[in-house]
Amino acid sequence: MVLSRRRFLASLAGLAALSLPGAALAAPPGKYALAGRVLSGADLRPLDNHAVLVENGLIEAVVPAASVADRPVIGVPGCTVLPGIINAHCHRIHTPEDRRKRWLEHGVTAVGDPGSPLDAMADLARSPAGTTATAAFSGPMLAVPGGYPLPVHDPKYGLVVRSPREAGDAVRRLADRGATMIKLAFEPGVMPRPWPMPDPATARDACDTARRIGLTVRCHVQDLAGLEPALDAGVHTVEHVPHRRFVEGRPRPVLDRDNAVMPAYARLLERMARDAVILTPTLDVLSRSLWNGPALYEPVRAFAAMGGRLAVGNDYPYLRTEAGMVLRELELLGRAGLSGRDALRAATVGSAAACGFTDRGIIARGMRADLLVTDNDPAADPGALAAPLHIVKDGVFVA
Ligand SMILES: [Zn+2]
């Protein structure tokens, strides 16, 4: 039995909730199947004429659509079922209401906020199932005195640590307030007066403590000088593709004369790929800077060719990046040579790993039912993500 969405919704008990504009359906849809081309598992393997079985907000199984007999089946011919998109790097959308309106209602079912004030953490921790984009968040980034982000951002975005011991204590304090990630930065800023970067022992203690208590460590690196110390400290992700270096006080690209990644940089990218350190390039925001060009795209291309793991984030709202579906970031990953499927993998599996989500990001048994249904396969036609036919959050139909 294949039902249209309208008939399916009408078959649910939660009809009263439908009359509340913008509200989530009050009744969980319970037991149903979404059918079409299913992008399944960690590799988004396309399975035509399959169905995702959903029960009580979780994915039960992926089975041939024709075999489903015990529940309503939703889908239209030619549609694709894929995991919800995750924006692994964005800021300043803290309340569940904002996250619903700005992200979830556009198909972004989870977000990572690596850098927010302490007083935003309570709102970020509120993600009632089925109603808003689930947030992973770090609270303020750990900063050494005078170091990034303090010279350029509001001080509330930094938490000053002066020693390895203070770094470990800060990580524990942030975890107590609900943080699921930690954010560091290796950013020397602009010459000739570089900002201090974390010393190795302080960075190491922050990473070790975070690892012990199960937090992901995200690390801001835009200058090549910050990459090796960040990797030495043991970070899990590198945020913003490193794209510049200073030579005799002047900013230079990280490419040689043929626009290939410099060998010293390529060795560090190889190390990241080998150690499964994730790169969140944030090309959307960086492409709005003076660095737009091969300095951004070539390192991403090289890293992807090495088998490196990528995540998708656009650093909203900096440099007028936009909320909603991360179409521009996906398009720019294409400019860096990623296939549509690889870009989608970065926006689902990769972003989930960068944020430390272990219960969402792929279509597999036991995962949260955060799902999109689109009229075309977005691996071939990313524009299909601009207006998903259905958005399902924790099994609940949001749209
Ligand atoms: Zn950021």
Image (cartoon, helix red, strand yellow):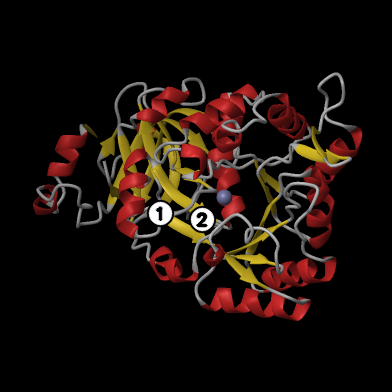
Name the residue tied to disc 1.
93
Rendered residue at 54%/48% (across/down): 88
From the viewer's perspective, is residue 323 above or below residue 144? above
**Side of 279 where 365 appears, left or right:** left
From the viewer's perspective, is residue 175 above or below residue 334? below
Q: Nearer the viewer, residue 83 or 337?
A: 337
Residue 179, horizontal then vertical, whole percent: 53, 68
Whether tag 1 and tag 2 are in contact, CB under 8 A, the answer is: yes
Q: Tag 2, which secondary structure?
A: strand
**Side of 346 where 118 appears, left or right:** left
Q: Nearer the viewer, residue 232 or 195?
A: 195
Where, by quadrant of the figure, is residue 386 drawn? top left
Crowdedness near tag 2: few (<14), some (14–19) or many (≥20) residues, C-alpha within 10 Å: many
Name the residue tied to disc 2.
113
Crowdedness near tag 1: few (<14), some (14–19) or many (≥20) residues, C-alpha within 10 Å: many
Q: Tag 1, which secondary structure?
A: loop
Residue 193, horizontal then vertical, whole percent: 79, 53
Residue 262, horizontal then vertical, whole percent: 87, 32
**Side of 374 where 3 appears, left or right:** left
Rendered residue at 35%/55% (across/down): 57
Residue 350, horizontal then vertical, whole percent: 60, 44
> What amino acid is labelled 1 in the image?
Ile
Tell me how far mark 1 sits from mark 2, CA to CA: 8 Å
